[in-house]
Image: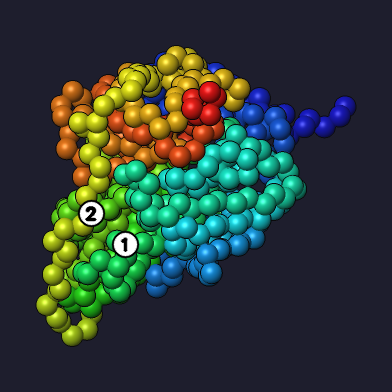
Amino acid sequence: MPKPDPLVARRSSLERRVSGQPGRLSRRRLLSGAVAGAGLAALAGGGSRTWSAARQGATPAAFVPGAAFVPPRELRSTDGRLDVALQARFGPARMGERDVTTYTYDGEVPGPTLRLRPGDTLGVSLANQMDESTNFHTHGLHVSPMGNSDNVLLQIGPHEQIVLAFDIPRDRTSGLYIPGFYWYHPHLHGTTSQQVGGGMAGALIVEGALDELPGIAGLPERLLILRAAFFDDDGVTMLPHGDDEPAVFVNGQMQPTLAIAPGETQRWRLLNASIFTFMNVSLEGHQLHQIASDGNPLREVWSRDAILIAPGERVEVLVQGGPAGRYTFRSLPWAQDSEFQAQPDYPLATLVSDGPGAEPGPLPSTLFAFEDLRAAPIDRRREVVFSETFDPFRTLLDGRTFDHDRVDQRVSLGATEEWVLRNTSSDTHPFHIHVNDFQVVSINGEPFAARSWEDTTSIPAFGEIVIRTRFLDFPGKFVYHCHILDHEDRGMMGVVEVVDDAAAH
C-alpha cells in the first residue's frame, strides 16, 4: 500500500477545521479560520508556503528580549538615483537573537531602508528566489501604477527577475506632500498576508521640507518597524491558529533597549507592518509629540499620551527624554469591548534615559498646512460597503470579492471625489488606497477637522467615514482594500481605473 501524502493529509485536516467553524467566532478563531482558509490555496500550489498553515498546536519560539536597539541597514540615493538589488527569499534569517526560517528581502527582517529625495528615481532589480510568485508595492508613494512601476497587478513568477523604476515627483503636487515616510512590501493577491507577515517589508523615506524645519532638522532619528508575527517552536514562520499569541518585534528585535539623554529630543518614525495587529503605542512617563501621519506633516504638533496605529499606518513623533531612568514603550490594550479584535498589552521596547540633564528644546510651533478639500467642488460621490459573512467566513466589498480583471470604480484623471466608506461588520477595517492620498471629512456622520491627508485610516465597526480625494497625475489601474492583509487576500479589495478623458478626445 502506498504511503499517504503528508501534504494531502495536512490539507484535509485544514479543510475539516475551516468547514467546521461555528457561525459566531472569537477574535482569535475568526483570524485563525480566515488565515487557514487563505492557506488552502498555498497548500494546493506547493512551494515554500506548504509548511505554514499546516502546522498544528505550535507554540511561539523562544526569542531573547533586551538587546541594544539596531536600526535597519540603510541605502541612500546619490545624484538623483538609488539603484538597489533585492532578493525575495524564503529561508534563514535572524530575529530576536535566534535563527528563524521566514520570508525576507536579502535575508534581513526588516529589509533595508531606502532613503531618497523628491525628484529622484528609485530603481529596483528584484530577483524572486522563492517557489511562489510575488510583486513589489511602494505603500503611500504618489507614483505611476502602470508598467514596471507600482503595479500590484503585475506578477513576478518563481525564480524570475524584474527591473522596476519609480519616478518620485518633486515636492508638492496639487496639495499632495511628496516627501515623507513610506514603506515597501509584496502585494500579490492571495499571498500578501503570508509574505508580509513573515517579514518582507522595509521603510522608504523621501526627505524634504519637514526634515529641514527648525526644531526638527538635525535631530537624532529612530526608525521603529513594529510587527506582530507568529513562529512555531522550531523558529519557522506560521499563520496563527486558535489561541496562538504573536511575538512582537521592533526591527526584528524583541523588546530592544534605546538610549536617550534627559532633555534630548529625538525623532521617531513608527511603522505598523503587522498583518492584523493594531498598535496602541504609548511611552511611559512621556508624551508623544506627533508631527506627521502616513508621510504627511500635520498642521501643528499634536502632543498625545497614546497613538493608535492601524496595520499599514505610519506616524512620526518627537520624544523628549525624561529624568534618568528606564521607561517602557508599549502597545496598550485596545478594543477590549470587541469580541473579535480585542488585543492585550504588548511591551515593545525599553527607553533608557541616562547622562547629564538638560532642558528640552522648544517644539516647532507650526508645521505645514495642506489643501483642505472640505469646501472643494465635488465631481462625483460614491459609496463602498465593507462587509463580512460567516459559514464560511468571507470579506467583501460591495458584496463581491476581488476580481483582478474587473474594474470596480472608473474615475477621471484630475477629478475630486467624495467616497462614503461604510462598514457593516464588527471588525474595524483599515482602509488603504494606492497612488493618491485622501482627507477624512466625517466620521460616523460627525464633521471631522483632519490634521493632514492620509493613505490609510480605520473605518469603525458598524460605522462609516467620508473621505475626499483627487486622482492626480497618473492614469492606470490600482487598488483599494482593507489593510488587515488576510481580509485583503480573502477578497476585500477593489480595482480603480483612472482614465484621461481629455486624452480620449
Q: Which mark is residue 209?
A: 1
Image coordinates for residue 273, horizontal then vertical, percent: 43, 48
Residue wearing tag 2 = 368
Side of 474 relative to 388 (left or right): right
Q: How many labels sit on residues? A: 2
Side of 489 relative to 7 (left or right): left
Image coordinates for residue 73, horizontal then vertical, percent: 51, 68
Counting residues from the start of the chain, the first of labels 2 and 1 encountered is: 1
> Is residue 404 something one can see in this rendering?
yes
Which of 125 and 130 lies nearest the eye of the viewer? 125
Which of 40 and 317 lies nearest the eye of the viewer? 317
Outermost residue, right side: 1
Which of 455 and 369 lies nearest the eye of the viewer? 369
Q: As displayed, is residue 18 above or below residue 298?
A: above
Which of 375 and 214 lies nearest the eye of the viewer? 375
> Is residue 109 something one can see in this rendering?
no
Give the quadrant of the N terminus: top right
> In terms of secondary structure, where does tag 1 sit?
helix
Residue at image location 69% in from the left, 49% down from the top: 162
> In terms of secondary structure, where does tag 2 sit?
loop
**How are the colours assigned in the image?**
rainbow
Side of 52 relative to 429 (left or right): right
Choose top left, top right, bottom left or bottom right for residue 27: top left
Residue at image location 25% in from the left, 66% down from the top: 213
Image coordinates for residue 237, horizontal then vertical, percent: 56, 48
Mark 2 crowd level (few <14, some 14–19, many ≥20, 10 Å Cα)? some
Amino acid at circle 2? Phe
Q: Are marks 2 and 1 in contact (CB under 8 Å)?
A: yes
How far is mark 2 from mark 1, CA to CA? 9 Å
Amino acid at circle 1? Ala
Residue at image location 63% in from the left, 37% down from the top: 154
